[in-house]
Image (cartoon, grey):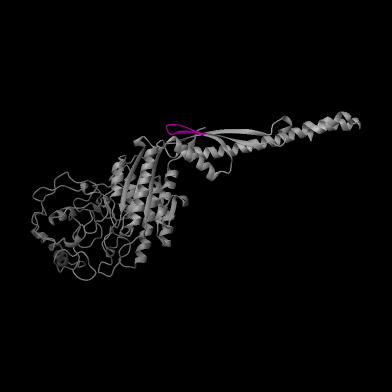
Amino acid sequence: MIRNLLAQLPADERGNFAIVAAVAMVPLVLAAGVAIDFSSISNRHTELQNALDSAALAVAREGDTISDDEAIDIARSFLAANFRIEHGGLKVFRTGTRVTVEATARQDLHFAGVLGYEDWQVTASSSADIAFNRYEIALVLDTTGSMAGGKLSAMKDAVLGLVDTMASQIKDTEKLKFAVVPFANFVNVGSQHGPAFRKNGKMKNKTGADWLDLKGKADFPQTELPTGLSRFELFQHLGQTWKGCVETRASDGEDLDVSDVPPNPRKPETLFVPAFSIDEPDGWGYSNSYIASSADPLDKTPAGQLKKLQKYGIPDASQLDPKDPSANWLPVAPSTFGGKGPNKDCLAQPIQPLTNDYDAIKKMVKGLQANGTTNIMEGVAWGMRALSPEPPFTEGTAKAPGIEKIMIVLTDGSNVFGNNGTVFGSSYSSNGYLVDGRLGITAGSSSDTNRLMNARTLAACENAKAAGTVVYTIRLEEPDVKTGMMLKECATSLNHFFDAPSRRQLDDVFRSIRDDVVRLRISS
């Protein structure tokens, strides 16, 4: 049309004004049309650039262990699945973890045809690299009885995939460490931290971690065992080896139960007390009677207290050597038939502190077993401690720019205290028995204890987040609304909470967490 107009202008004999106006209109129309075409080109370039940016990130996220063909397939598949744009000449260049993606696209032109251009080739490229920080990741994993079977297998596979893919991306092993914190009704800190004993049964000096209550000095409500009695010595006297589980620290107004306050031997309340499953009465509702005795576990009279100690072979205090109280203990032969005894409730496997020995991490994860009831609070509290540079575990580094501390909490159940109809009000837990009152009540329903345990779990989460830890939570096949709300609040944000109604979703959940944790950047 514009060419025809130009050809007709010399033959037009109308007024000079019309001629001048027509001539002046041509460049204006042409300029406006070309501007529209250039705008279309610019939009297409932006669209292609955004697509390539995303494709470069998708390839870079897989690390440098994939082949070049796999890298091209990932880029092509990502573009096809996420962007409706026809492109050609797709190329992927890789140098270490740096990825460059190039491609071209065509943009049809509507006005520049007068200048001989029917379309325009748009070219774009994008480079991405992993912005490596230093990552310290605590895997807080539910290993309770309800996880047995397919759920445990799915969790293991998802965790192993996370470790493998992150390790393939981050070649500097000093920049990536994992800790594993299995939890059930107790958390196991590792029996290697307990004291050593001589052949005569005496505790060796300067053995045992100083963050453990070696001498029984911590003063807190407990059934049957008095303050001043070393649980380690009692284990030894009964011919048993402490398996490594510990009780929850009594709150003592300082949130010691859910905080990372460092243990201090001069402050016994800050020490961690070894779990000791007491000899329970014979009869219905009791599962851990391993010494023949008629002692009443709730008898607080002097005679009643003495009778409870005598069943463990501890005589009247007047018969004890004040310099060596355990010297005159009497022998006792407890039955450990059927798994009974002072270690009965220690079911969780030991914590693996932060390490970059990925083979050790994977070996531990593969060996996890399901047993016990759910105590999410203890898992979170010890996940926080595993990331800390303070004792008990000191493998963590102090919080600083470039250091990412991450906790991933997975559970398939609600907090359970183990309420029952015995005189204790519950089974033995990391907070002792319900009758001890260490959770805040001495009697109540399972709903009451669940509510209180949820509150303490949230307090542990808040302490972890206040310390700079990013908390991800995963609810696996657990429909309980209260647990879901608690886990949402525990997470750093709603985007850090994952609800997985099916175990088949766990791989995708852990992949999403990995993609969020390992931040990538467009480098050009």
Residue 279 or residue 227, whichever sits in front: 279
Q: Does the rendering let one see residue 254?
A: no
- Residue 489 in the image, given as x and y percentages of width and height: 43, 54
Q: Does the rendering let one see residue 407?
A: yes
Quadrant housing residue 10: top right
Is residue 96 covered in magenta? yes
Residue 316 or residue 391, whichever sits in front: 391
Magenta segment: 91-101
State whether residue 18 is above or below residue 210: above
State whether residue 294 is above or below residue 158: below
Residue 97 or residue 263, whichever sits in front: 97
Residue 302 or residue 519, whichever sits in front: 519
Give the quarter of the figure containing the N terminus.
Answer: top right
Is residue 165 covered in magenta? no
On the rendered structure, is 146 left or right of 92? Answer: left
Quadrant housing residue 431: bottom left
- Residue 492 in the image, given as x and y percentages of width and height: 44, 49
